[in-house]
Image (cartoon, rainbow, N blue to C red):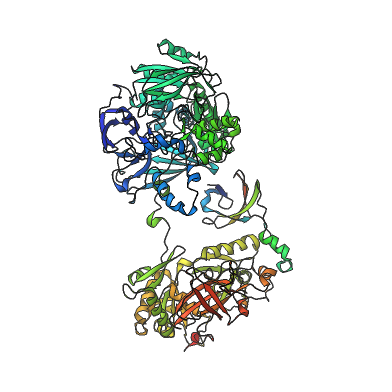
Amino acid sequence: MTEINRLDSGGNIDRTQKITFTFNGKSYTGYQGDTVASALLASGVNIVARSFKYRRPRGIMAAGVEEPNAVLQLGKYEATQVPNILATQQEIYEGLTCRSVTGWPSCDVDFGGLIGRFMGKMLPPGFYYKTFMKPAFLWHTYEKYIRKAAGLGRSPKESDADRYDHVHHNIDVLIVGAGPAGLIAATRLSAANVRIMLAEETTEMGGSLLSSQQDINGKDAKVWVKAALKDLQANPDVRLLTRATVNGFHDHNFVTVNERVTDHLAEKAPTGQARQILHKVRCKWIILASGAHERPLVFGNNDVPGCMTASAISTYIHRYGVIPGSRLVLMTNNDNAYHTAIDWYQCGRTVIAVVDTRPNPEGKIVQKVREMGINVFAGKAVIDVRGRNRVTGVVIADIEPSGQAVMGMLTTLDCDTVASSGGWSPVVHLSCHTGCRPKWREDIQAFVPGSHRENILFAGSVNGHYDLANCLQEAVNCADQIILNESLTVQEVLGDFKVESALEEPIMPLFSIPHTKPVMQSPKQFVDFQNDVTVSAIDLAVREGFHSIEHVKRYTVMGFGTDQGKLGNINGMAIVANALDKSIPEVGTTTFRPNYTPVAFGTIVGRYRNQLFDPERYTAMHRWHCDNGALFEDVGQWKRPWYFQAYPGEKMQDALNRECLAVRQSVGIMDASTLGKIDIQGKDAREFLGRVYTNAWAKLAVGKCRYGVMCNEDGMVFDDGVTACLAEQHFLMTTTTGGAAKVLEWLELFHQTEWPELDVYFNSVTDHWATIAINGPNARKLLSELCEGIDLDKDKFKLMDWRQGIVAGVPARVFRISFTGELSFEINVQANYGMHVWKALQVAGKKYKLTPYGTETMHVLRAEKGFIIAGQDTDGSVTPLDLGMDWCLSNKKSFSYIGKRGMARSDCLRKGRKQLVGIQTKSKEVMIPEGSQAVDNPYQPLPLEALGHITSSYFSANLNQSIAMGFIKDGFNRMGDTVYYPQPDGTIITAEICSPVFYDPNGDKQHVE
Amino acid sequence: MFYIRCPYCEEHRDEQEFHRVAEANLVRPSDPDGCSDQEWGEYLYFRKNTRGEYNELWVHSVGCRKFFNIQRNTETYEILNTSPV
């Protein structure tokens, strides 16, 4: 393709660097510095998309982030696919491959277009809601096809090959936007010894000055921009970012900036570079100089390729040396857009006419354009556009000065490009992210930022100061305000300027151009191009009773999509106001939320993916587990062995049965290092324990351990564990694996806020110790082979004792405590010795067939004994009394321990509470799924009265039957009763209520010789 | 994300180092066993949930582990003061 629309000179592109790229399978050329959009326009490409609903051909309308149509799927390979990239933002590089995200089979020939042409009238807002409501069961079928037709790009199916980074900054001033206001504010502040970040969304700093013909200090504005940038680059306290969009303004001046570091270089980021960086900036001050977007006027068939905003045309001419057509008709309601007519004219192409909707435009620039011999039609408007794949002409007519109706004769003009300008909409988005509402200014017909609490200042056209002199002055004032507020000393006064004020005549309040026909019958007048929302759709929504702008938005989908209505929203709000006969500020805006533009998931995630997504915690013996067939279970962040496969492919139930039998028949070994361990010291440690545990601690002697239950103030169990008395003022508390952090904070909370007078200190020592539990009748024999310095005799080292000694040659604390009901020792050694001791036990244990077991076997064994697991058999609504653990409550303590008053409330003492009992199925091999609800009569009328649910359910190899625990209303008084567990598949499991202790009810096994 | 000054560390840190615990200045009754169910229920469950200025107990959970009070505006998210408990 030849670049028919490329000008011979001009534009900030490198004409020595020719670049070839592919769009929709065809090859195009452009130059270094081009965007996909400018290169496509240079090659005369008209159609870049098909519209969402009516499948109409669409062209490029804008030059920046507000572009609604030119949305691309980028990427040559599966792993480099990026959806929803704007052609107006994406710079071209050699080999770039992109496609339109809409259109089937292609956007040039789209079969869906037929639907739009012939059925357009049948697709009003709410069409899907209204049509596919009935019958309800068919929705899932409809949905499949609707989803297929909807949506823009697609996400890649392979994992992203690029790296993304997060960078944190603490700075003094963040300046958003490097247009004239941003540049001059940075310049002035750069003399004040503050850390500044200047973030610019586009590739180049300078903003409107890059396509302006104005002078600053008597020289071309571009010269001023260059000089200012040179000075700023030389200042080490100033950080300049281009291709960096400030996307979110969060509480307390926290700002997120998305820098596209290498998107413009190649398909994949060069080695060692991050593709994009998310800058997380905490700043004292923000100067918002984000500028304004020009909004188009709304008129019939205003979406035909060739319809553009006026300023976009100027940008293409000045920055890229591209003129997107031959014969221009420009429609405007303001003076500013006349610059585009001048630019076009100076390129040597024809300006057919300027159509000004104002009855008597007499401004300086209007005169200038007239003097150039360009036709200026006053009091007229373009009411319709001719052409389908490209503009071929326009219909113009006189309109009433109010802009409400068309008068007089219609005239047709031949042209291939229609530029329109309905004025400028300040980019107030960021100012609204923390909840402030923008305010309407009637004089400039625009929303500007509302009042703010934060340290945020506004400069330039974002605040409605479109005139260059005012814009620069306001930015200088902002900088001075910061200098004054922070009492900064300035080395020299920078940023003085001389600019001629360009006086403009006022804008005419006009958003939507009337047609000779009423709205519902006129040609389609598009408001939101990305979502195909028309004036008639908004009108219909209002007539159907949607009066709040937020409701109209959701009903018509105006302002959704990847562009979030940047181009069309203000027009849409004005049209709603008009339909409701209200003022624009009365209707207001929808809510602006972060992010301002779409952000790639990769950027949000940064390096926190794969193994860095969430930390994994390993015990000291983890490697051994991996090497010996362990399958792991996640408990909090810990990886715990779930069960061990004796040979590859061993079935889970087989492994569990083998492990369970081994423990009860000989000896098993388990890694219990993940249990939370809290070291407690201080002369009031004992008193403190008595207050947070439900049982008594006053008499626990050194060398002894005790099981304790911890409750909330409401009397409900929240954690349990064994605490050992290491010395008179020194205790070691163990908690559940998942509850460790929570318990430590709980202890600190009560110490710091309720009982600061107690002398007690807490420290987490979970990671300091490796804990190895050996369980089974041969546990003592095994331990005796490796243990020195501890008398293991059963009457010297009793159940619930602990001893200090040497195990496998290293210092150890050995606890004789049991969670399985077997003879059991828990060996605690410094974590670094964990693997050594574990391996030594494996060697010594061979003759006892020492069997490693995991959490699942531990669960089965403890359930056989009726021991609870806090968090599995409790859920925050269960008191110790409900668990039948009254033995664990001490009412002799002088202090009212935490939970005591709570569990004495009338509701906790009433009859009919759910209580934890054993459940035995009638058919012993049947297991009840955990969570199943018990009922007395499964045939009672619905809804069934549920008595309580199963909390733990296993198959016990030792008993050769299923065992379960669960809650039953008034269960303690219902031993022997039959209950039923109806299942989702219609079967009913019959079971009997029994004691939760299924195995060794007298507890003889833990006292074997 | 809030920017919170820990009154113990005497530094501003990002919100992710902290978390909110409860309404500030809740007083545990000195004689819980002497409380009626009504009184205990008030202590357990009833909170002001003010719109506007509000005192909250926060903890510098991954910092110094200290609990402290934040006086803040729940409507504007301004933090007016932070102080030790």
Residue A223 seen in render: no
User: Left of A312 or right of it: where is A939?
Assistant: right
Q: Residue at x 61, y 33 (%)?
A: A586
Q: Residue A547 at x, y = what percent?
A: 59, 37
User: Left of A86 or right of it: where is A696?
Assistant: right
In which image quadrant can residue A744 be found? bottom right
Query: In the depicted view, which residue is nearer to us: B33 or A389?
Result: A389
Q: Is residue B29 above or below residue A585?
A: below
Q: Residue A322 at x, y = what percent?
A: 33, 25
In which image quadrant can residue A483 be found? top right
Q: Residue A262 at x, y = what percent?
A: 34, 40
Q: Is residue A454 above or below residue B68?
A: above
Q: Residue A139 at x, y = what percent?
A: 46, 51
Query: In the depicted view, which residue is nearer to us: A321 or A184?
Result: A321
Q: Residue at x 36, y 40 (%)?
A: A101
Q: Is residue A594 above or below residue A514?
A: below
Quarter of the figure with the N terminus of chain A: top left
